[in-house]
Amino acid sequence: MVAQGMYMGLNDEAVQDLSVAGQRIVGGPAPSLDAALEALARGQAAALHEELVRLDWRPSPDLVAKVLARAIEGVLIGSGKARWTLSWTGPATLLDAAGKKVDVDEFAARLAADPTQVAGAREWFARTGVSLLPRVGTPVS
């Protein structure tokens, strides 16, 4: 229940909305996180920000980075590379398969700020088996 609740509360909307925003900017047959990365690669972070605001996100200087971080967590979860875990001493924690804490905030901030980082990020996602293409259903166990 914790994993499902955390995913639905933090990650699902970010994955969906960032995917839609990316498709609106770069086109494509379906919304995908890859489309959002393509928008970033093209230097269109401001356009992503505008589209996210149209999708009811609150404007902020770091909006794209924040939504991107939650979306990256979402695709990691969907690919079985991470999972929300209950902690009895604090908030739920996102852990990788080895039990290490996953923190993608800095990674997402670099991607949002620097279009040259996108190619390397795409390679990393592909190498680790994380799909950026559209998915069906909620990938939480």
Image (cartoon, helix red, strand yellow):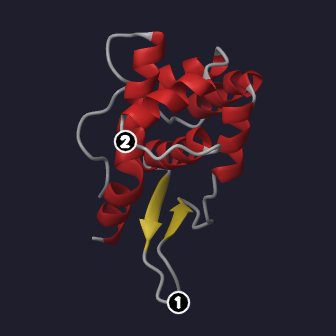
Q: Quadrant of the C terminus?
A: bottom left
Q: Which residue is mark 1?
A: 89
Between 49 and 91, the one lying in front of the other is 49
Sequence order check: which comes first, mark 2 or mark 1?
2
> Is residue 94 something that shows in the picture?
yes
Residue 15 quadrant: top left
Q: CA distance from mark 2 to mark 1?
A: 33 Å
In the image, is 21 to the left or to the right of 36?
A: left
| Residue shown at the point (58%, 45%) measured from the top left | 60
The local secondary structure at tag 1 comes to loop
Residue at horizontal 69%, vertical 21%? 119
**In this rendering, does residue 133 appear at all?**
no
The answer to whether 98 appears left or right of 138 in the picture is right
- Which disc, if any, is residue 56? 2
Q: Amino acid at mark 1?
A: Thr
Determine the image quadrant of residue 20: top left
Using the image, determine if residue 113 lies above or below residue 73.
above
Q: Residues within 10 Å of mark 1 (few under 14, many from 20)?
A: few
**Which amino acid, by three-letter code, is at mark 2?**
Asp
Direction left: furthest residue = 137
In the rendered image of this protein, does residue 3 appear above or below residue 70?
below
Left or right: residue 48 compared with residue 21: right
The residue drawn where x is 76% and y is 22% is 116
Residue 112, percent across and down? 66, 34
Quarter that holds the N terminus: bottom left
Identify the residue at image location x=65%, y=26%. 123
Position in image of residue 131 (x %, y %): 46, 31
Residue 3 % position (x, y): 35, 65
In the rendered view, does 21 fall on the left or right side of 42? left
Instruction: Classify mark 2: helix, strand or loop.
Output: loop
Mark 2 or mark 1: which is in front?
Answer: 2
